[in-house]
Amino acid sequence: MLKKFFINTLSSFVGAWIALLLVGVVGCIVLFGFIGRLALSQNPEQVKSRSVLKIELAGPIEEYRMEERPDPRDIITGNFSSVQTLDVLIEGIRLAADNDNIAAIYLDCGNVQAAPATLNALREAISDFRKSGKKVLAYGDELSMGAYFVASAADSVFLNPGGSISLSGLGSTSMYMKDLFDKLGIEFQVVKVGSFKSAVEPYIMQEMSAPARAQLDTLYTNMWGYIRDNIAKSRKGVTANGIDSLINIKNISFAPTSLAKKSGLVDNLIYGRNMKSRLASLVGAEEDKLNFVSPSTLVNQTDWANSFSGKDRIAVLYAVGEIADGSDRGINYENLVPLIVKLADDKDVKGMVLRVNSPGGSAFGSEQIGEALDYFRSKGKPLAVSMGDYAASGGYWISSCADIIYADPLTITGSIGIFGLIPNFSGTMNKLGVSPQTVATNPSANFPTGIRPMDARQLEVMQAYVDRGYEQFVSRVAKGRRKSVEAIKRIGEGRVWDAMMAQRIGLVDSLGSMSKAIEWTARKAGISNKYNLGAYPQFSPGIWSFISENGLADGLVSSFDEDYFRKFVSEYVKTILARKPIQARMPEISVGFGL
């Protein structure tokens, strides 16, 4: 017995050392691979005379630069690469217009993944660039609708003869799952305020309610009208009605590419290999010496948005993602509130632009952020809000008391309402043969619980709780927008609005880009002639940024991938479970655009 014990112990000891040795060997291979890739990497981009700014309209476009948190599957397969950000793209285009070495812009179009407001901001930047007199050329093997929306602002649009152009209008599909939950024995008990607060519907209904359908119909009609009309204005001989006809009658997405040229959607049909010669001819350079630069190359040559200690500073504070208490995957009030207070107390910060791109989330977290923003304004500093893709429900809560609100015409906002969604798993437990037994000193000691339904009194308590939150929400909006509570309730009820309608009903002050919000803030602070700009939370590149920017992720497979994957899944599950029972969150709207 003793001998067997020593043999097992020794084998475990040796096994552990072998495992450590293997990890060390793999680590060295990865390290030397990094060094080798760096040594063999190409020279950094240089902005030479007659250079072309190349913008790749492919993949996701995020709101701003932040530390990379990659999907573990991409790390394992080596597909991990740096994500493009709207702030760098917009600033790069602006710098290119004033840079004598940049002769043109080339839009290399693919399957771009971004919401309409993000793509519209990019499109407007392209239109502003053209005012410099420099040309913009766009090409795509296949033009997705999102990519084409941006490309239509170019001087010339080219399509591969064997490719396609996708135009289909706007729409979305919501999965209503009541029957599924019934089969699983799961019941969702709902308390809410707002007939349009439809985020709860997929859990408790079999089909969409009339109010929910009506608000989406209005939303998509207005947004599509803006997109269609702007494409028509940019393309000679193309009309808004003609675009609808191409979609509804001629099925342009599945038609021969010759129809895209004949109808005026594109200027010519050519193969991608011919674009380089066209660009070289355009800028007066030899084809083999044509120099492409990226927006990040231009931006990295400046100190744009990197002033964190200078005087006369405008802070741009990003609030992006779901408002989820305690989670860093979104807007965590525990991190954001201290930062707002710090900026308020910093005498060198003269004003702030809050960039909101959020569908909302925790009502409690929204209120904490709103109170901190009130503190900022109490210091006599101007506060402007710039809305991105979404600024709805909790996203509008934190926006409503700003001095001025700017939004992109295609921003989705409003959704002034609150709901509670409390699951009851008693049916599931019965199916599994589980019988919970509770001992408590008070009837509501475990209330609310997910193992039994709420009784009438408990439902009444929860409804009163939600009603108080709604009154707080409405009162805050009424104060911020300088309207009566009754007026806000008429446009509230959880209804989402496009920014164009939101401006008409007083939820938004002006339609415009973030740069306009920055200019207004600087002017209001009395420093419009010269000011510094700092973007917060402050970006500090980490290991994943280093890997993606230097192309070091190819084939990266090591022992820490599995650990990272487990952590990734764990954090995601914790985010869901950590949601407060009372939410100020817009319904799940994923506009079918650019897919």
Image: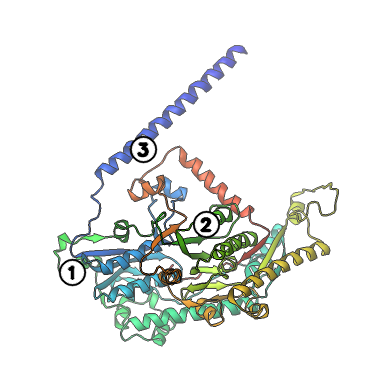
Residue identifier under label 3: 30
Rendering coords of residue 263 (x, y %): 32, 83
Residue identifier under label 1: 283
Q: Quadrant of residue 515?
A: bottom left
Classify mark 3: residues with Cα within 10 Å, few (<14), some (14-19) or many (20+): some
Residue identifier under label 2: 345
Residue 145 versus residue 228 in the image, above or below: above
Q: Label 1 sits on what residue type?
A: Val
How far apart in space, not on screen, are marks 3 and 1 (Cα)? 42 Å
Classify mark 2: residues with Cα within 10 Å, few (<14), some (14-19) or many (20+): few
Rendering coords of residue 335 (x, y %): 55, 53
- Element assignment for label 3: helix
Q: Is residue 158 left or right of residue 225?
A: left
Residue under the point 36% across and 83% down: 233
Rendering coords of residue 167 (x, y %): 41, 76
- Element assignment for label 2: helix
Quadrant containing the N terminus is top right
Q: Label 2 sits on what residue type?
A: Asp
Q: Is residue 52 left or right of residue 564?
A: left
Q: Label 3 sits on what residue type?
A: Val
